Image (cartoon, helix red, strand yellow):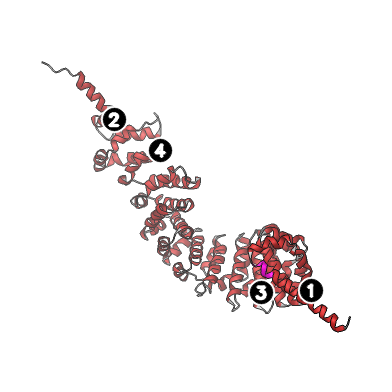
Amino acid sequence: MSQRQVLQVFEQYQKARTQFVQTVAELASRPQNIETLQNAGVMSLLRPLLLDIVPTIQQTAALALGRLANYNDDLAEAVVKGDILPQLVYSLAEQNRFYKKAAAFVLRAVAKHSPQLAQSVVDCGALDALVICLEEFDPGVKEAAAWALGYIARHNAELAQAVVDAGAVPLLVLCIQEPELSLKRIAASALSDICKHSPELAQTVVDAGAIAHLAQMILNPDAKLKRQVFSALSQISKHSVDLAEMVVEAEIFPAVLTCLKDPDEYVKKNVATLIREIAKHTPELSQLIVNAGGVAAVVDYVGESKGNVRLPGIMMLGYVAAHSENLAMAVIVSKGVVQLAIALSEEPEDHVQAAAAWSLGQIGRHTPEHAKAVAVANVLPKLLQCYLRADASEDLQTKSKKALKNILQKCVHLPALEPLLHDAPPNILKHVVGQFSKVLPHDSKARRLFVTSAGLKKIQEIKAEPGSALAEYVNTINNCYPEEIVKYYSPGYSDALLERVEQFNPKA
């Protein structure tokens, strides 16, 4: 065989390898082909191609493996068991930028499925190699590495700590300062994934100077970047008063409030979540948000949103109101009760209704004035309905019952209480009757109305255990009226009268 023929054979072999690996990578991009490729044993065929002498074949083999591993955890597990990860990690340090991107993609695809698979990526020494990639000149390599590190860190505190210990945080903070939008987004997302687990991890990110750089991007026109920026700031703020104060000190108010009207739903939701996480800590932080116009902005947001997007706004109003009478009044003045009542009525999901019930309870529990503001929005019958609904979740029933009790114990606005006399079960009725027993002895107009609205009649129908609190409340109410009036409205009184009529013997 001549030299020319030998070269032709090698050329054909190279073409065949190239065609094979490109075809597999192409097929792996479509989910319907994955099972067939897996059954054909494609993993074991791709592995040696990671060491091929031709760089494009190496890169395409890594890309194909990444697409397979990305599909499900079984295939990701097969990549781990096929001993492919050590080869990828070794090549991350040695190869060109195209290969590095493809190798980082495989590591990310494996790590995303579970903490166990992410741990396998860590165990093969990937973190140090990925952190080195964050220092590469090429932004695409940095992006691929940041993405993989974020996917490792998101599972639990131990994995996030491993990412921190590898020295990733300062480099990720540098990445959010780079000009490339996609790199900024992914670096901010990775920082968010590190922060979320514990105050200590969030503090590490703060110590690296992340807050100032994140805060500078809150008005960036790119929606996907803003999503990640607000997510990261929320994850920092949620852990402690100190961390929340550091976020506030970056002068994010009132600028963030404009983002509650962003066209992107995820941006809006993440902003509302950030405001909620700050408001929950202290009255002072809540007051700062009120002073910036934050409560009015969140009330508008609750009115304009639906479902899970609405949820952080609903909870934020509850957290603000929980701190003090004045802050609860700020929510009332901003028409917060009206929007929460609408959410309670129209939301189909139990968990959103439960949040609205909880927030209304936090507003109404302070004083009679607060309770009246909630009661006149016709909230009490709706809360009762949620509590009594047979198919309601346990959480919705618990929160509705608690909110009802909180509001009822302060409510002296009797017209709002009357409908509950007819519908409430004994454990709620006790609180309703208790409020009537407080007001009626001191208010003659209310006593008269109570008779004409059939309230007194209803009281006589209540079967209270002798000596119980409910029996005491009923007695107190009955003592407000002449004995003959009480008798007149007692069950069976009309029958007794008729009997007396029958027995009456007029004198001839």
State the separation of the CA atoms marked 3 and 1: 24 Å
Which quadrant of the figure contains the C terminus?
Answer: top left
Q: Which residue is mark 4?
A: 425
Name the residue furthest left: 508
Label 1 crowd bin: few (<14), some (14–19), many (20+), radius 10 Å:
some
Mark 4 vs mark 3: which is more N-terminal? 3
Comparing 491 with 429, the one in front is: 491
Q: Position of residue 305 (x, y in %)?
A: 43, 61
Tags 2 and 4 touching, CB below 8 Å: no
Q: Is residue 495 left or right of residue 321?
A: left
Name the kind of residue labelled 3 in the image. Lys
Name the kind of residue labelled 4 in the image. Pro
Q: Position of residue 205 (x, y in %)?
A: 62, 67
Mark 3 vs mark 1: which is more N-terminal? 1
Q: Which residue is mark 1?
A: 52
**Image: magenta residue range:** 25-29
Q: Which residue is mark 3?
A: 142
State the separation of the CA atoms marked 1 and 2: 96 Å
